[in-house]
Structures are given as structure tokens and as C-alpha cells.
Amino acid sequence: MSQGTLSRDPLPRRSLLNWFLGTGVGAFMVSTLYPVTRFLIPPRVEESSAQSVALDVKAAELRSNTGRVFKFGKQPAILVRTPAGELHAFTAVCTHLQCTVQYREDLQHIWCACHNGHFDPVTGKNIGGPPPRPLEEYTVSARGDRIAVSRSAPA
Ligand code: FES
């Protein structure tokens, strides 16, 4: 037997190993750099272009001391009926780090679960926790039994 028929060329195995190492390192770099890049350069949050939304809820269906999150364009908004029976609406996007807020019946105000942020249900003012600004207030108009929420004051 000749030497050439028994020896195998180690180059294909080595290049296969190099390929695995190269793709592994490449995948690691992508999986590490992508989240870091997304954190450093967050995606632009689109401003809602909606000016008015008619809600699919009747005013009589909303109990006092409750809140309901709804879509206002592409953004969440919250409709609150205070314990005194007043209707108020705000953006439901927290002014801290953009979590969606909710109404807490036990606290009787708007609350953000992400970092324990608190907002007044009548004014939207930030009253506790890390949120730096009030919630943007919308105008609520109840025509008949239907509720409409808009950015501008009703005509
Ligand atoms: S995101 Fe709402 S308190 Fe931090």
C-alpha cells in the first residue's frame, strides 16, 4: 500500500472547524451588538396622528372609579370615570419610559406598573414615582350615549 492512499487530507476537517468557529463568533457578535445598538439608538416612537376617536362604549356602561384603555390612533389612551362620576381621557403612554398606564380602583388614580408611577385621574398630573411630566390630556365629549375622545377642544 502506498502512503498516499492511507493518509487523508486534514484540510477539509480543519476548514470545517474554522467555518463553525467563524460563524459562531459572527453569530455571537450579531446577537450581542444588535440589542446594544437598539438600546443606544432606540426606534423612533411615532406620534399618533389620530385627532378624534369614537369609543365603542356607552357612557352609562362606565361605572364610577374605573378606567378603560383604548386605541387612539397607534397609541394607547385611557378613559377614566372618576369616583365623582367625571369622564377624563389621557394618553396611556407613561412619561417615564413609555409603559402603558392603567387605572387602579384601590388607589383611585392612574398608575404605571413598570416603576410605580402615579398620575392624577382628573388632571393627568404626575403625583408620584419617576414620571417627569403629566399625561397628555384629551377632550372627552359624550353625545347622547356615545363617547368621543379628541385632541382639540370640542366645537
Ligand atoms: S415607565 Fe412608567 S413609571 Fe417608569
Image: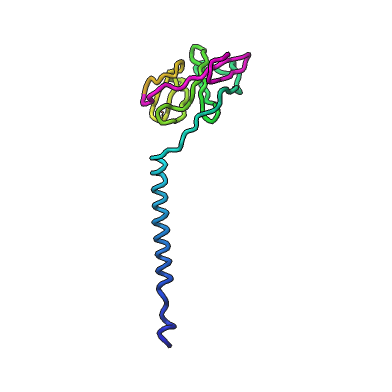
Which of the image's four quarters has the N terminus?
bottom left
User: In this view, which residue lies farthest toward the right?
Assistant: 144
Q: Residue at x 39, y 61 (%)?
A: 21
137 in magenta: yes
Q: Quarter-wise, where is residue 24 in the image?
A: bottom left
Residue 27 vs residue 85, the one in the foreground = 27
Q: Quarter-wise, where is residue 40 in the image?
A: top left
Residue 11 vs residue 105, the one in the foreground = 11
Which of the image's four quarters has the C terminus?
top right
Give residue 77's position: percent from left, percent from top.
51, 25
Q: Does residue 31 lie above or below 138 as drawn?
A: below
> Which span is picked out in magenta?
129-155
Give residue 80's position: percent from left, percent from top.
51, 19
Residue 35 vs residue 45, the one in the foreground = 45
Q: Does residue 39 lie above or below 70 as drawn?
A: below
Q: Is residue 68 visible?
A: yes
Q: Residue at x 53, y 23 (%)?
A: 68
Q: Quadrant of ligand 1?
A: top left
Q: Residue at x 41, y 19 (%)?
A: 125
Give residue 129's position: percent from left, percent from top.
36, 24
Q: Does residue 9 lie above or below 115 as drawn?
A: below
Q: Quarter-wise, where is residue 111 in the image?
A: top left
Q: Is residue 71 visible?
A: no
How many circles with numbers are drawn on the protein?
A: 0
User: In this view, which residue lies farthest toward the bottom?
Assistant: 1
103 in magenta: no
How is the rendered protein coloured? rainbow
Give residue 151's position: percent from left, percent from top.
53, 20
